[in-house]
Image (tube, rainbow, N blue to C red):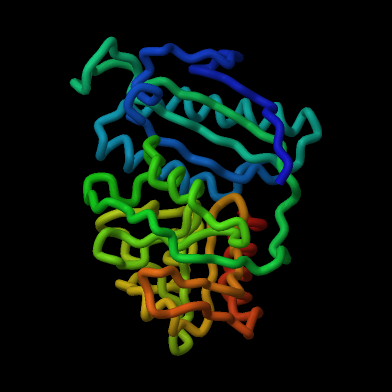
Amino acid sequence: MSQSALICRVNGRDTEQLSLFDRGFQFGDSLFETSRFYHGHCPLWSYHLERLQLGCLRLGIEYPEALLSAEYARLCQQLSEWGQSEAIIKFQLSRGESQRGYGVVQGPSNLITLAFSADPVDQTTAPKSLEISPVALAQQPLLAGLKHGNRLEQVLARQQLSTDCDDAILLDTDKRVIEAISSNVFILQNGNWLTPNLRESGVAGVVRAVLLEAGAVTVADIDVATLYRADALCLANSVQGIQLVKQLSGSENFQESTRYWQHLDASEYLSQIYLERFTLS
């Protein structure tokens, strides 16, 4: 996907500069949402707002409702006026600024608004090849489900991704399947779609929320053996939608070597639900 920056704003001002004392920069003390802009709006925006509000509540970060609403409206209007029918937008919300130390100083949060160019939404892209990542996710229930600003585990996993793989499955320290590097995971087992339990770690994605709300998937504990026995495997996130997986390679830590999926139309059911929610919003 080719991208270039279209809009850069901080707290309602056009700028590419942020204070060195911003806690998101210093500690990853922030939350963020990345979404698809599609013909005038972000179709899944309500789900992004719900997750952002939950994160602010759990971390005690000021939720700037009025500013966020104004920035979202301005962004949609500006992109539309430019004739930009599709884009990727990102809102990052930090706790604000402090001079030094972990101690929280109550004050206004900082809202960063970004927009990037994007290729059109395409649910017919080639199926992906995956592997099991050697990077394990830490278990921290206080942060589980949130899209917080500390993504070092994902950065490390991306660094160690094999050149012949598109993505990797991340396990937690108990070797339970959690997610891919930037997507949620779904497996088909005995005619039922399952997605990993994220009570200890992982990001609760908005497409995952859509599918759960529709009753299309069920939350379950999934280990590596179950993953390899699955009838189909796919990934999902708000930027790329449903992504079918054709191959999963093992690692030296597991006896399984490689699993191939032959029924590559297995995710059509999930894709249909996603596209209906996306295009009719």
Q: Picture coordinates of residue 224 (x, y %)?
A: 37, 74
Could you tell me how many numbered marks the image carries?
Answer: 0
Residue drawn at x 63%, y 84% as measured from the top left:
263
Identify which residue, 121 or 182, lies in the foreground: 182
User: With 99 as the anchor, is 181 left or right in this view?
Assistant: right
Identify which residue, 233 or 205, lies in the foreground: 233
Q: Picture coordinates of residue 59 (x, y %)?
A: 26, 35
Which quadrant of the view contains residue 37? top right
Residue drawn at x 42%, y 76% as measured from the top left:
227
Which quadrant of the view contains residue 162? bottom right
Q: Picture coordinates of residue 61 (x, y %)?
A: 30, 29
Q: Picture coordinates of residue 250 (x, y %)?
A: 46, 72
Identify which residue, 171 or 76, lies in the foreground: 171
Residue at the far right: name it: 83
Residue at the far left: name it: 103
Q: Is residue 156 above or below residue 26?
A: below
Residue at the far bottom: name it: 190
User: With 78 as the anchor, is 154 left or right in this view?
Assistant: left
Which quadrant of the view contains residue 64? top left
Q: Is residue 59 above or below residue 222?
A: above
Residue drawn at x 66%, y 34% as measured from the top left:
116
Identify which residue, 237 or 78, lies in the foreground: 237
Q: Is residue 21 above or below residue 254?
A: above
